[in-house]
Amino acid sequence: MNAGALLPMLLAVALDLAFGDPPNRLHPVAWIGSALVAARRRLIRPGRVIPLLLGASLMVVGVAFALALGIAISLGLAKLPTPAGLIVEAIMLKSLFSIRGLARAARAVAEALDRCDLPEARRLASWHLVSRPTEGLDGPFVAAAAIESVAENASDSIVAPLLYYGVFGLPGALAYRFINTADSLFGYRDPEREWLGKVPARLDDLANLIPARLSALMMVLAAPVAGGSSVLAFRIWRRDASKTASPNAGRPMSAAAGALGVELEKVGAYHLGAGLRLPGPDDIGRSIRLLWATTGLALIPIAALKLLLATRHLYQH
């Protein structure tokens, strides 16, 4: 078996845990976001048809560019000596996910709630974790928002890029990150972006169908690490997964609600884990433990798939 195929992924995770994110000026996802923000200013149009076509065109061009860039990088890495190529590939992959950064952002909210600084907790949650308004949220709702963000981003921002890397290598991971970043900037139902963001949002839904369900399953298995029950996590996942507007976000969030034994509610949108207790700052800390365990467990099937594909490739050549 080609165990070397796993080294970039494992090294990428180790680099993330050790060093966290690079500064934005060196961060490919930040570059993607800046390019999309610039494109958004130029693509805003009235009506429906023109914005829909512009959004579709943006995704075709962007995904094609991400795939081409990933292929070019992979071909270049193949020409490097083996150790150097593996290390550079790991650095590139590490830039496409952030476990440590997500945990740090959630922990900052928990610490603010712990010292009863609700305005700061609201500010940190809004700045780092959620797009919803937080000004009027009380403590349990701020804690819920942080936990929801940890759960959803465990799937969208960690498991998904690793899974696409495991199947399609750097081109797949880069293309996924373009789709996901585009959705985060365009996928809103406000007057300016509703039709422009239709195609990015639907592509992101499609891209996350498998990662969201894999993440939810791993959260069920990881529940005891966070002091919870896998049985309850599975029950709440099955009961509440479809209660969000997104076909995917409700999967890891409902599994996390059950794993932690807490209610997660976004007023006027969804209510996951109804009947359980309200969350507090300690539960944010537990959600971080759930994040670590979920990531570790998800690496097992992703690594197995990567090894299987690498072995098949060797036999074919």
Image (cartoon, grey):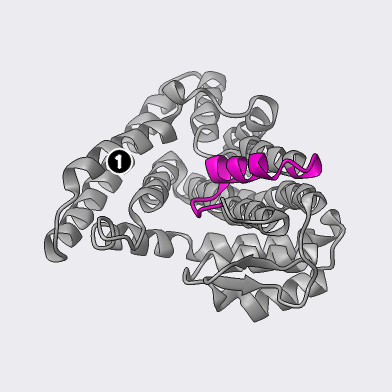
Dot 1 surroundings within 10 Å: few (below 14), some, or many (20 or more)? some
Instruction: Name the kind of residue labelled 1 in the image.
Output: Leu
Residue 96 visible in the shown view: yes
Coordinates of residue 127 in the picture (x, y in percent): 54, 40
Does 28 appear above or below 51? above
Residue 2 visible in the shown view: no
> What kind of element bears circle 1?
helix
Does 134 appear above or below 20? below
Coordinates of residue 181 in the picture (x, y in percent): 40, 46
Residue at 45% from the left image edge and 22% from the top image edge: 26
Coordinates of residue 102 in the picture (x, y in percent): 62, 41
Reply yes or no: does residue 129 show up in magenta.
Answer: yes
**Residue ID for mark 1:** 36
What is the span of residues highlighted in magenta in the rendered image?
Answer: 113-134
Residue at 51% from the left image edge and 47% from the top image edge: 161
Residue at 36% from the left image edge and 57% from the top image edge: 187
Coordinates of residue 152 in the picture (x, y in percent): 58, 56
Total label count?
A: 1
Specify the quadrant that holds the C terminus.
top left
Does 100 appear above or below 81? below
Residue at 33% from the left image edge and 52% from the top image edge: 186
Specify the quadrant that holds the N terminus.
top right
| For residue 130, side relative to residue 112 (left or right) | left
Choose between 253 and 161: the one closer to the eye: 253
Main SS of the magenta part reads helix
| For residue 238, side relative to residue 60 (left or right) | right
| For residue 309, side relative to residue 223 (left or right) | left
| For residue 270, side relative to residue 114 (left or right) | left
Reply yes or no: does residue 266 show up in magenta.
Answer: no
